[in-house]
Image: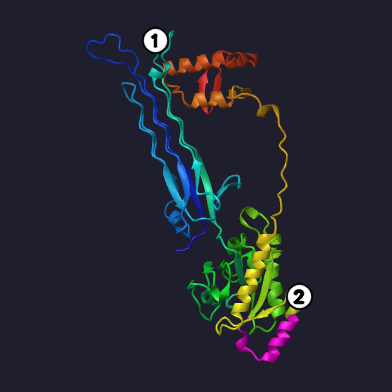
Amino acid sequence: MFCDKVEVKIKAGNGGDGIASFLHEKYKEFGGPDGGDGGRGGDVILAVDDSLNTLHYFKTHHEIRAENGERGKKRKSHGKNGKDLTIKVPRGTVVIDKSSEKEIVDMTNHETFVIARGGDGGYGNAHFVSSVRQAPRAFELGEPGEEVEAVFELKMIADVGLIGLPNVGKSTFLSVVSAARPKIANYEFTTLIPNLGVVEPGTFETESGFIAADIPGLIEGASKGKGLGDEFLRHIERTKVLVHFLDATHEDLRADYVTIKKELKEYKGGRGKQFGAKLSSLPEIVIVNKIDAVPQDDLKKKIGKAQEVVSSKIIPISAVAHKNIPALVHEIEKKLKKAKSKKPEKEEVKEKTFTIRDVVSRDVFDVQKEKNGYIVKGTKIEKFAIRTDFSDKHSMMRFRDILTKMGIDKELKRAGAEEGDKIEVAGKRFSL
């Protein structure tokens, strides 16, 4: 079943906790600390599978979780690392952060991508042995794995997009020039999902061939949700040439052409990003299909009227009768070569404005006074807080020692904090 847009919750594995343990063994009076470190949580990795052409897997797998790392063990044994979880996606999948609506990765030119990293394991008490600390009892918790709420959008990889009103013969043309077998019937909206067709080199004596995408027909008001809407236009965002089909049996080909151009201009891609200007300005080939179904005099009048608003020469064809198909295929290949030879426009690169935050160390922290106490923020201290078990007195003693060494306790007192005041770091609270 075809599916081109899904929401997925992704969770990397949590790191395993370290443990506090002491060696108890016969004939070893001073065994010492032997608590091992926790294992690292597994990553969630996206991998391109070119045999896939749908995101249907995620319709029944809304939540993706990698394996957690194991807890540390006695005898300084390291906990087992969690297994990485590799998820296969079709090439052309775009991953968007649901909350910020920013693109995380486009899997068009990536083979693999780590979408969520597993948390590091916590240290066991054996890790903290030193010349001045012979029997430490402190240990660390494992870090939580990264979480991502993402939207997956599939955008097909095609050179040529076939567009037009419903039932104008796009699918018939695709079945003639390629091995694709889309549904073909004499009623509107026969095509409910995009279809890809590969025109092999040598077809009608072509040199290189191309890939064509046939999308469901558009109608007036598609950009406002009428008919099947215009969401399927995302599958021609990557194309370099559009082939615009007109139906010779329709009364006003000029109006049909204007209708589709208007819907292209008003198209907005995912996240409301304006793609209409790009789509409507792509190189196009306008053809009139089903020429064998109308008298020649009527056909000339209709084409002449449409030619008034079409800048390129309109090509008459009959996909069913295979009339002028070779000429059209060669024209597509010609336009495609020209489009590919053009140098892509360089995107404006905004110069980064460097601030003091770009060059300071991770030791930097900030103390903020709140109504119910004080909040301490900073990359390094928050990492320590996450890994500290605030219910264990030995681990808490170590955390307070870190506060002193980093100068945070002095800053708290300078901000007015007194003994007994509540302090919050990384969502965890304790009394000063």
* Residue at left offset 56%, top offset 58%: 155
Q: How many marks?
A: 2
- Locate residue 160 relative to residue 111 in the image: left or right: right
* Position of residue 56 measured from the top left corner of the image (x, y, whole percent): 45, 58
* Position of residue 172 measured from the top left corner of the image (x, y, whole percent): 54, 77
Compare residues 186 and 411 and report the one nearer the observer: 186
Q: Answer whether residue 290 is visible to the viewer in this image.
A: yes
Q: Answer whether residue 218 is visible to the viewer in this image.
A: no
Query: Which numbered circle lies on residue 309?
Result: 2
Query: Which numbered circle lies on residue 134?
Result: 1
Compare residues 269 and 179 and report the one nearer the observer: 179
Q: Residue placed farthest to the right in the image?
A: 308
Residue type at the position of mark 2: Val
Does 290 lie within the magenta span?
A: yes
Between the residue at mark 2 and the residue at mark 1, the CA separation in whole angstroms equals: 87 Å
The magenta span reads: 289-305
